[in-house]
Image (cartoon, grey):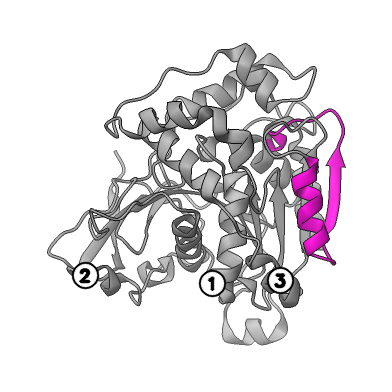
Amino acid sequence: MRAARRLSLRSSLRSSPQSTQGAPRTWRDAGLAGSTRRLGGQPPRRSGGATTQLTTSDRGENAASEPAVELEELGGSPGALAWPREPDGWVLADDGAALATYVHEPARLPAPRWRERLAGRRPAPPTVVLVHGWTLTAAVWDRTVAVLTEQRPDVRVVRYDQRGHGSSAARGPLAPAARPIAAISRLADDLAAVVDTCAPEGPLVVVGHSMGGMALLSASARVPGLLGARTRGLVLVSTSAGGLSSAGRPLVPLMAALARLPQDVLVPRAPRLLAQRTNYGPGVDPRLVADTMRAMGRVSGRTTGEWFSALMAHDESAALPLLAAAGTPVRVVVGDHDRLTPTSHAQALVDALPKAHLRVVAGTGHMMLVERPDVIAAEVGALLG
């Protein structure tokens, strides 16, 4: 067995929530910026109140550049989700929650310019950060990652399980016990932590699907640095700035009951036919539906119920003028069969963002990232140039 190398990520974990806000949170501190190694090991734990340990195994320089799935065609191979898998690393949120992250390093690094050659360093590759939606996990991006990295081998891709989803903790040790943790603003802060840690430099594109898009909208207002000069653009997929409460009202009693369950209790999966009708367009490959349901099976009933309430309360209309004023390129994508965040929500986003580009995809439902990963890859490519 190959020996594992221990790496330290400095993260101050004192007794108050504010103590982590200024703490260093970069893999550069652990000597990992630009590395083609993947991180593994166990989630970071509080140890002596000072240091978080990350582990990386010596698997060779090219191990991380292999495609996530084999491609049968441009859209990827249905039924090919290679999940669950060991996270490549962990990011500590401000409340100490460990967020599982998965990194695909570029197969081809950008050539250094003459100044960088003289300095003996390479430019940072463009990074695409993928943010998944409610009751899902980072697994649902597999097909998108496969298509994107096939078309753009120079791109680095970072995705993560949102808190309470997949392998990520629902609540950190520094979170006040009496304060609800399920809020879109909390996800926005988590997104900022992931970007700070995993993509601190180089061109940046952030893609948010459904609840992930809502977190991205919130982050654009709460984290001004996210829209800096290096940000090439944002892709909002099947999402909304708010106004979901009326459509979700019939589910409120059920979701309230789920929110009272212990965190470790999983809920039965929805019948496949119902999931297919709710989330997909007509004629979807049943293997894609099965893949998504496997990802959903790793989310607890409590997470499902608590974050449903956050979605119903979600209103990021105040963030839209700030995003418009920043001038950051925005691509809005929606399927014409999306029953959860229909085209009217996408149109409202574009109306508030005069420079945004709207793409409505025929025959596609809410799970655009699974049904048409080629569309998302094309939108990312348009922003990267």
Q: Nearer the viewer, mark 2 or mark 3?
A: 3
Give the image quarter of residue 238.
top right
Query: Which residue is identified by label 2?
Result: 16
Left or right, 123 with reference to 53: right
Indicate the amino acid at tag 1. Answer: Val
Q: Nearer the viewer, mark 1 or mark 3?
A: 3
Looking at the picture, which amino acid does disc 3 mark? Pro
Label 1 crowd (10 A; few <14 / some 14-19 / many >=20) = some
Magenta segment: 343-369
Q: Which residue is mark 1?
A: 223
Density class for disc 2 (Cα within 10 Å; few <14, some 14-19, many ≥20) is few
In the rendered structure, does residue 258 fall within the stretch colored magenta? no
Measure the alpha-carbon separation of dots 2 and 1. Answer: 21 Å
Say whether disc 1 or disc 3 marks the residue closer to the N-terminus. 1
Relative vertical location of residue 285 with respect to residue 131 in this rendering, above or below: above
Would you identify the image quadrant in which residue 129 lies?
bottom right
Q: In front here: 64 or 155?
A: 155
Percent x, y of residue 53: 26, 58
Looking at the image, residue 61 lies above or below residue 31 = above
Q: Are marks 2 and 1 in contact (CB under 8 Å)?
A: no
Q: Which residue is mark 3?
A: 321
Which of disc 1 and disc 2 is earlier in sequence? 2
Quarter of the figure that contains the N terminus: top left
Q: Position of residue 372 (x, y in %)?
A: 76, 34
- Kindly state the secondary structure of the residue where label 1 is placed: loop
Q: Quadrant of the C terminus?
A: bottom right
> At x 31% / y 50%, what residue is drawn?
171
* Image position, residue 308 (x, y; %): 49, 39
Which kind of residue does numbered mark 2 sit on?
Ser
Q: Alpha carbon of mark 1 to alpha carbon of mark 3: how far?
A: 14 Å
